[in-house]
Image (cartoon, rainbow, N blue to C red):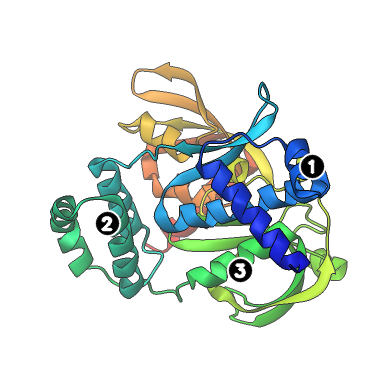
Amino acid sequence: MTADTLKTTRVLELYQDFLSGKLINKQQAAEQYYVNVRSIQRDIDSIRDFLSEQCAKEGIVRKIEYDKKENGYRLVTQEIEQLSKGEVLALCKILLESRAFTKEQVEKQLQIILNLCVSQKEKSDIEWFISNELFHYHDPAHATVDPDNLWMVAQFIRNQSVLEIEYQKLKDRQIVKRMVEPVGLMFSEYYFYLMAVITDHSTREAFHKKNDPYPTIYRLDRIHSIKETGEKFSVPYKDRFKEGEYKNRTQFMFGGEPQKISFNYYGPSVEAVLDKFPMAKVVDEKEGVCSIEAEVFGTGVKMWLLSQGSKVKVTAPEILVQEMKQEIERMNGQY
């Protein structure tokens, strides 16, 4: 037998032993097959990879786990927790509401979710609940993002690959080239965004805030091309970009600096405000008014504050108070 044939036979026999419920001790297996322990470890890793692929295809979770007491590895089959009918309906509603994809894409995605998660009877019931929304669904006005490209960008981020992108700016529609280090991927208000640090210091100096240390926000549908440069960058795990924390402080995905703001809220639902600002807290509450402090990032918060009309009054910082006054005066001048 060739070495490859022997290895294949060994892996298949180990896999059969796992299926039979046997405990595999690496040292004993190495002696049995006249190989070193590292070879057995590689065999076990190969079986783990195979089981992972089978899980994605069949939905059955099987894992090779180490039993510390018995000093060996065994196959463990786990029960799969199913989504409830209500959870599947909620996911379908959220997907429709996001308007991130074309109608054709959404129809395909909904069918996959329903086929995988519910029975035919339940599928029919859920289709009835979402049919009207789907019938009246309009494709988004912006160019939609190909999910395959989304995955490609995610891999660039994970692999820390320096990219060259061609990006169409919002104001003058000019297409510019940027060399960037991609650090995050986010979704907000119908759009997917790439968070990236510009590597060219001369470009960063031309920004509103010179050498801004925070990532620049690029809407994925306005990126015309993405190329790997072959270069890599390195960010320690503790210093990595944290999408969750950033999203909790950011409104409408506008760049800027972190700041703490205070405002009075006179509206009927303070819960809606706290949902909009996860990092906010009510510091004082009197009849008809709540004083709120919030940690935010960027200038997008002004759009939300202005959208609330007389239900909101900004009290700090002073620079934001003045900006709100100036914007309200400009609005008044248009009427």
CA–CA distance between discs 3 and 1? 43 Å
Q: Position of residue 226 (x, y in %)?
A: 67, 77
Element type at mark 2: helix
Name the residue at the front extreme: 1
Marking on residue 67: none
Marking on residue 31: 1
Name the residue at the right extreme: 201
Residue kind at label 3, given as amino acid type: Met
**Where is mark 3, residue-wise?**
152
When asked about the image quadrant of residue 46, the answer is bottom right
CA–CA distance between discs 1 and 2? 49 Å
Element type at mark 1: helix
Q: Earlier in the sequence, mark 3 or mark 1?
A: 1
Residue at point 61%, 68% (across, down): 152
One can see residue 93 in this view = yes
Q: For the C terminus, give its image quadrant.
A: bottom left
Q: Nearer the viewer, residue 22 or 110?
A: 22
